[in-house]
Amino acid sequence: MQNSLNNSRNRPQPRQPAVDSRLKEALANRDRYLERHPHLRTYQAEIDRILDQSGNVHGRLAVLGMLMQGKLLEMQGEFYKLNRFLQ
């Protein structure tokens, strides 16, 4: 038991400042993007609302995956319509 405690103490700890810095940079990039594309603010608000209710990080990643998959399926449908129109 003592050995496992020592091993956990010797493990490198996550570098929190680097994570905080990347998060701040990502949020700043998002805000700049929304400034250039204000029509997407409503969609971003919906994403934020859903993510706030998704629980832990695994839940958030699952939700993001589902949202992305949904948009990809929408795009696939639009490409299908475009392809039919062009033929």
Image (cartoon, helix red, strand yellow):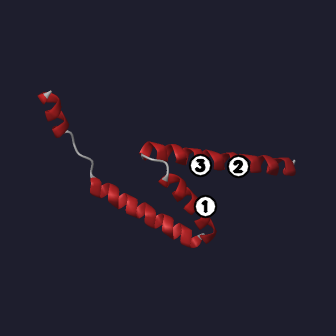
Give the residue at x 61% y 65%. Answer: 42
Provide the secondary structure element on which disc 1 rests. helix
Find residue 20 and report its horizontal and vertical position in percent.
33, 59
Location of residue 73 (image quadrant):
top right
* Separation of residues labelled 1 and 3 (CA atoms): 11 Å
86 left or right of 40?
right
39 left or right of 11?
right
Q: Earlier in the sequence, mark 1 or mark 3?
A: 1
Question: Given the image, on which type of amino acid does mark 1 rest?
Answer: Tyr
Quarter placement of the N terminus: top left
In terms of depth relative to the viewer, which is nearer, 48 or 14?
48
Q: Nearer the viewer, mark 2 or mark 3?
A: 3
Task: Assess whether mark 3 and mark 1 are in contact (beta carbons under 8 angstroms).
Answer: no
Question: Given the image, on which type of amino acid does mark 2 rest?
Answer: Glu
Find residue 64 and report its horizontal and vertical position in percent.
53, 48
Give the residue at x 19% y 36%. Answer: 8
Q: Which mark is residue 67?
A: 3
Find residue 57 and report its horizontal and vertical position in percent.
42, 46
Provide the secondary structure element on which disc 2 rests. helix
Question: Given the image, on which type of amino acid does mark 3 rest?
Answer: Leu
Q: Which mark is residue 43?
A: 1
* Separation of residues labelled 2 and 3 (CA atoms): 11 Å
Q: Which mark is residue 2?
A: none
Q: Earlier in the sequence, mark 1 or mark 2?
A: 1
Near mark 2 (Cα within 10 A), the count class, few <14, some 14-19 or many ≥20, is few
In terms of depth relative to the viewer, which is nearer, 82 or 69?
69
Provide the secondary structure element on which disc 3 rests. helix
Q: Is residue 2 above or below residue 25?
A: above
Near mark 3 (Cα within 10 A), the count class, few <14, some 14-19 or many ≥20, is some
In terms of depth relative to the viewer, which is nearer, 41 or 54?
54
Q: Which mark is residue 74?
A: 2
40 left or right of 27?
right
